[in-house]
Image (tube, grey):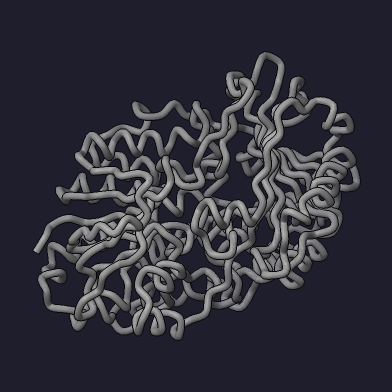
Amino acid sequence: MTDRIAVIGGGLGGLAAAVVLAARGHKVTLLEKNAWVGGKAAVLEEGGFRFDMGPTILTVPRVLRRILEEAGCDLDQELDMVRLEPQWRCFFDDGTVLDLSENVGTMAAELDRLAPGRGAGEGYRRFQAMSERLHGISERFFFWKSVEDLGDTLNFRNSFNASTLSDVLALRMGSTVAGTIRGHVPDARAAQMLDHFTQYVGSSPYGSPAVLCAIAHMQTNDGVWYPMGGTRAVPTALERVARRLGVEIRTNTGVRRLQVERGRVVAVETDGGERIPVSAAVSNMDSVRTYQELIGGPPAKRFAKRRSYEPACSGVVFYLGLDRAYDHLLHHDFVFSRDPEEEFDWIYRQGEPAPDPTCYIAAPARTEPGVAPAGGEALYVLVHTPYLRERHDWNRMLPAYRRVVFDKLKRTAGMPDLEDRIRVEHVLTPQDINDRYNVLNGAIYGLASHGRFMGAFKPGNRSRDVEGLYLAGGAAHPGPGMPMVLMSGWIAADSLDQDMRDGVHDGAGAGSARAVA
């Protein structure tokens, strides 16, 4: 039996898994269909402008630090990181401009100035205290291990006690993010700002469970960071470390099938017809598509029957090279919609682009001037849209929606002469995202986190249906966003490594305890 492990897909989760496995002594081959590794964390360069094409906000860097430490590497030596403060600048439809500070006291005082006499500052302090509690619960029960449902988080038979009961009650199961926020912070503008932590996971705050409020503390406590060289520097560092560890990285090599015999992964078949024997595989491909397209048969049916998953939202991304920067922008900016309930209803219930959307802007030249010619800006503008439906033809829809987005930026973000400043323009639509990254229905963030009780749960990193299959990426536990995707790769690798050491992949077949647990 071979001792080779295949990692399918070289996104951040796949790279993290490859590094951890190789650091623990495993022989790893990473297969990536594109010409680059890093997945959506790609780069676009033209005319002296450089754009991060995918994620632009890096939070919770200790996840990346832990992965690199597995390989004996120091994050501070591998990457030059800049902590951003304020973290965001927010532009509202009524003309209000509000900066999000990582300092809770500073932010509370600012909210009291924004909404005097309404207790907004004290409400924000209480919200952050609750968020810290939820973050702590997540660290104890949810992070750093393979989780698929509530039974994986709490051992009701052996460890359920008064303290655990208190933690369960603190999860506010049955409550939504939006409802929880508004129960603490009475100002609509502040609430809309806090709602958008759930946009890290591509979901509506009106349909997501309250436990996701933990993201607020994760960001204020651990900071918002920019790696010099852009977020593309993260996969570049991981690739460099992986190669040092002996990982075989094969780009331009897609995978068309995982060969399963007697319930166990035995080989990977590439698009070119090559059969690579393996002892196990980590799929960084979308988890639903992994089962549908690479495995099929009874395992895919069992996976689909256990729970239905909805894609998270997609988006339109504009990459705009400007000859003159806008000095009133921060590195990260949100240009908020006039009505969040209307916006999220259009995107998540009606399945159509919002008529007045929120626009996220990254303007990195104030942190790294080299992303643009002198005085210019490499502007990144993301607007969330529904995931792809059959009725969506973005070749037809894009011109009109470009006008909606640009009008919003001109009206609300103080950018009336935007089009006069553009020297380079590119765009990614949901269809482009779907085709480029092999994601489910063009979803940027994997699977939606909707559902007041089970919304936070994604497919576990250790497959329950196929022995030797492990899942990483935004469509696996713990979900999307750079730190969570990186963590998913660590969990997949750690689970695989544990199983190898416990003798699970010794040919016993899918009847082993871990495979059917």
Please state, as top left, top right, bottom left or bottom right, where the C terminus lies in the image. bottom left
Tell me where residue 238 appears, x and y as whole percent: 35, 39
On the picture, is 133 further left or further right than 251?
A: right
Quadrant of residue 420 within the rendered picture? top right
Which residue is more in the foreground, 194 or 428?
A: 428
Which residue is more in the foreground, 259 or 145?
A: 259
With respect to residue 240, does 174 lie above or below? Answer: below
Q: Residue at x 65, y 52 (%)?
A: 125
Q: From where the camera sits, is residue 155 visible?
A: yes
Disc tally is 0
On the picture, is 378 further left or further right than 234?
A: right
Quadrant of residue 250 within the rendered picture? top left
Which residue is more in the foreground, 230 or 332?
A: 230
Tell me where residue 18 appears, x and y as whole percent: 28, 48
Tell me where residue 398 appears, x and y as whole percent: 77, 51
Tell me where residue 261 appears, x and y as whole percent: 21, 76
Q: Residue at x 20, y 44 (%)?
A: 23
On the picture, is 320 further left or further right than 451?
A: right
Q: Residue at x 67, y 51 (%)?
A: 429
On the picture, is 358 further left or further right than 472?
A: right
Q: Residue at x 43, y 73 (%)?
A: 292
Q: From where the camera sits, is residue 106 visible?
A: no
With respect to residue 231, does 292 lie above or below? Answer: below
Please state, as top left, top right, bottom left or bottom right, where the N terminus lies in the image. bottom left
